[in-house]
Amino acid sequence: MPLLNQRIRPWLRKAGIPVFFAILIAIVVVIGTQARPAPAAGINTLPSLADLAARLKPSVVNISSETITQTRGGIPGQPGDPWSELFRRFFEGQQRPGFPGQQGAPPQRQKRTNLGSGLIVDSKEGLVLTNNHVIEKATEITVVTQDQKRRKATVVGRDPRTDIALLRIEMKAGEKLPAVKLGDSDKLRVGDWVMAIGNPFGLAHTVTAGIVSAKGRVIGAGPYDNFIQTDASINPGNSGGPLFNMAGEVVGINTAIFSRGGGNIGIGFAIPINQAKILMPQLRKGKVVRGFLGVSIQPVDETLAKALKLDKAQGALVSNLVKDGPAAKAGVKRGDVILSLNGVKVKNPRALSRMAAGLSPGATGKLGVSRKGKSLTLTLAVGRMPGQTQVASAAGKDELGDKLGLEGQNLTPNLAKQIGAKTHTGVVIVRVMPRSPAANAGLRRGDIIIEANQKPVKTVDDLSAAIKRKKKEDNLFLIERRGATRFVVIEGSG
């Protein structure tokens, strides 16, 4: 150091004070840079989705469908069902301006254009997957690809119950279109990033991103609700468009939004792509055929679980069976709780409905059943669902007054005919006392008790004897109400 000082001092006398301060500042900057802490390990900035979006957009199409409607005179804009403002479809009818006429005027033919989106799933055949409500009752369908070419399209197959439709677009000989890759929606986790591409408000090929907010949502759209909820911005016109994961695979079909004003508020819903993949082979053939078990079922709550000797509320409780249906032939009985189908756990009645519908008629189904606390495995031959849904619907004496808080009388064939009952034996409730155990359980006048504690009830005496045996335990009743059967627990009435 002494030698270094001897060399620096003469130089500083010549360079002057400004140079000295410049060197000092440089040294401070270097030291400050070295002292700055390094970024925490594992913390990265969000990646750009630009490359992914550029690669996927050619596989997404915009759909325009024209529908001819008969309109009556009246003033447009009258308020309708309030629920329509909560769950709105992702397309808006673009009606021509002007009033259709005054009230009482003769019907007029009016053309309406609906806007939606779709995804190419077969590059050679030109098959496009979209929502059924985008093209329902359409007289003409036009598909616009990313290169702005307009092509006519026809419906190959559609399924209103799941709101899925398959279209075929016109193609030149030897032409190929870029198709999407279908992923596995079951592997999605809440919090995973997703990206939506669609045609919101007619703005072609719009890209938005968000996360999976929830899975298995039921919004009342149909019997097979099982929606993915996402906060990726989705608006009218996105219907039928794809929801991608970060690997560029389609995991959902955007279908509905929750909105009070018609626009995005961060709550959108998509059909899981696995549901569409199950239906694709049938849609290609032009018709969807579902499996049929022949049971009416209801949820199992904690009270029912206790009465049925289950360790927790789970499965689907059989409240009725179709006569000579697949389940009845397999030995399923009223009061059984279906816990699994082909080894897959049944969480609730809606899950069983979806699982049963996905089976092919004629296939073998194995039911895991709990009957009075005992586990059974029953094998059935899956039937074919009839035109109307019959599978998986969610649907006295002083002693009776003292313990249950109700009065009843024997059901006769003549009385059954008068009240429109399906059953011909049982006890009809003629009065329910306020704040009684029966009232708390939701029983009503006109309900028919056909089983008590899993014993048949034909008369008031049968009902009285059945509740005597339970002492202080809860009573499990099977009732018929307006033609539908369901189980009810009357707590602490024995």
Image (cartoon, grey):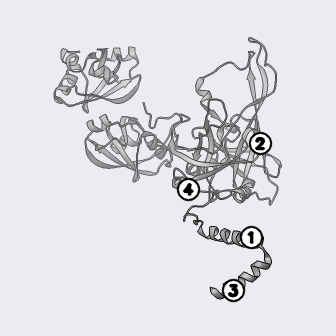
First in residue order: circle 3 vs circle 4 = 3
359 left or right of 211?
A: left
Q: Report the mark closest to the observer, 1 or 3.
A: 3
Q: Which residue is mark 3?
A: 6
Kind of residue indicated by mark 3: Gln
Mark 4 and mark 1: Cα distance apart in space: 62 Å
Q: In the image, which is nearer the foreground, mark 1 or mark 2?
A: 1
Task: Specify which label sits upstream in the sequence, 1 or 2.
Answer: 1
So how many labels did they put on this image?
4
Residue at label 1? 22
Q: Secondary structure at mark 3?
A: helix
Residue density around tag 3, few if under 14, some if 14–19, many if 20 or more, within 10 Å: few
Using the rendered view, name the quadrant where residue 268 is placed.
top right
Q: Indicate the position of residue 95 as horizontal and vertical percent values.
A: 78, 28
Q: Is residue 375 left or right of residue 421?
A: left
Residue depth check, mark 4 versus mark 1: number of the one nearer the observer: 1
Q: Secondary structure at mark 2?
A: loop
Could you tell me how far apart the alpha carbons at marks 2 and 4 are, in whole angstroms? 29 Å
The circle on residue 153 is none
Res. 203 mark: 2
